[in-house]
Structure formats: structure tokens, C-alpha cells
Image (spheres, helix red, strand yellow):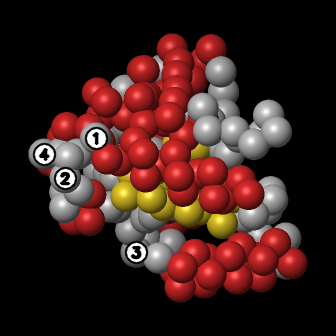
Amino acid sequence: RPAYLDRLQRILAAADQIGMAVIVNYFYVRQAKRLKPPELVYDIAERVTDWLLQTNFRNILVDVANEAAPWWKFPVLEPNNVPRIIRAVKGTTLNGRSLPVTVSTGGGKQIPTEPWLDAEDFTAPHGNGCQPDQLRDKLRRVKDTAAYKRRPRPIVVNEDSVFVENLEAAV
């Protein structure tokens, strides 16, 4: 929708002016499940990524699917298929430039699978439902994976519980 893209472009510009990065999320379970056929997510992801690249903003991070998890019951965006959508976004380039991309995990104990970690540029585990010690353990478990050890990358906890102490746990 033009109105949505116009608003997003204004947000990107305002954030860029103050030196802020913007995490742009493409899919949420309730909206994604409406897509017919489900494989339409790949076309949408590529078109949105192309549009974002054409804005020429460099303050964009992509979270393709918010809290991808088996409970989505939408196979194309469940954990085992997440690497494919990440590769689709990363493969969309403009003059050799691509956008940093991830798919965020659900809260609780869920961490990305090894292939998911191998595909993403940064990791976005959610801390909802975690006490500070549980979040600390979740982040340690991510860092202990073979994929993370092969290629350490930024970890962004972009959704969390109400515990202020979780901010300290993420450091």
C-alpha cells in the first residue's frame, strides 16, 4: 500500500536523522497465515526488500518473521524453513548491497536452529516469559552453538518481558 510505504519512508528518514536503526518486520503469524498460497511470502519478502534498498537508507535491519516457531502452523515460516526466507532476503541486492537480516525467535527457551543461525546476519532472541537468569541462559545457549562460534554476530533482544533486570542480563 502506498500510504504504508510513505509512512515507513518518513519513519526511516526521521530515524536516520537522529542516528537510529529501524528493525523492519515483514510477517507476523496472524497476517502471514492469510497468504494464499503460503509461498507468496518469498515474493513479498523480495519485493519489500527491493523497495527498502531503493530508499538508500543504511539504518535498516530486517526481521523477516516475528517469533517464528512451530506453533505458527504455517510451514514456510517455521524454524526448519527459516533459512530459505533469510536467503531470499539476503539474495535481494541493489548495486551489490543487501540488508542485514534475521528472523526473531519466540520467548521462553526457544533459540534458532543451527541452519537458521548459519543463515542470519544477527540474532534476535525474544526474552518474553524469561526471568533474568533464564534470559542470560538463553543468550549463553545461543553463544554456545557451533554456528555462533563459527561466526559470532550481534545479538539484539528486541522484545522482552517487563523485568528491567533483563536489560542487565542481556549485557
Instruction: Describe the element under mark 4 as helix, strand or loop.
Output: loop
Q: Choose mark 3 or mark 4, whichever is in front.
A: 4
Q: Earlier in the sequence, mark 1 or mark 4?
A: 1
Instruction: Describe the element under mark 1 as helix, strand or loop.
Output: loop
Q: Tell me the CA gap for discs 3 and 4.
A: 27 Å
**In this picture, residue 139 sits left or right of residue 67:** right
Q: Which mark is residue 162?
A: 3
Q: Residue at 48% of width from left, 20% of height from top?
A: 145
Q: Tell me the CA gap for discs 2 and 3.
A: 36 Å
Say which residue label 1 marks: 39
Front one among 114 and 92: 92
Q: Which mark is residue 73?
A: 4
Q: Which amino acid, mark 4?
A: Lys
Q: Earlier in the sequence, mark 2 or mark 3?
A: 2
Q: Which amino acid, mark 2?
A: Lys
Q: Tell me the CA gap for discs 4 and 2.
A: 14 Å
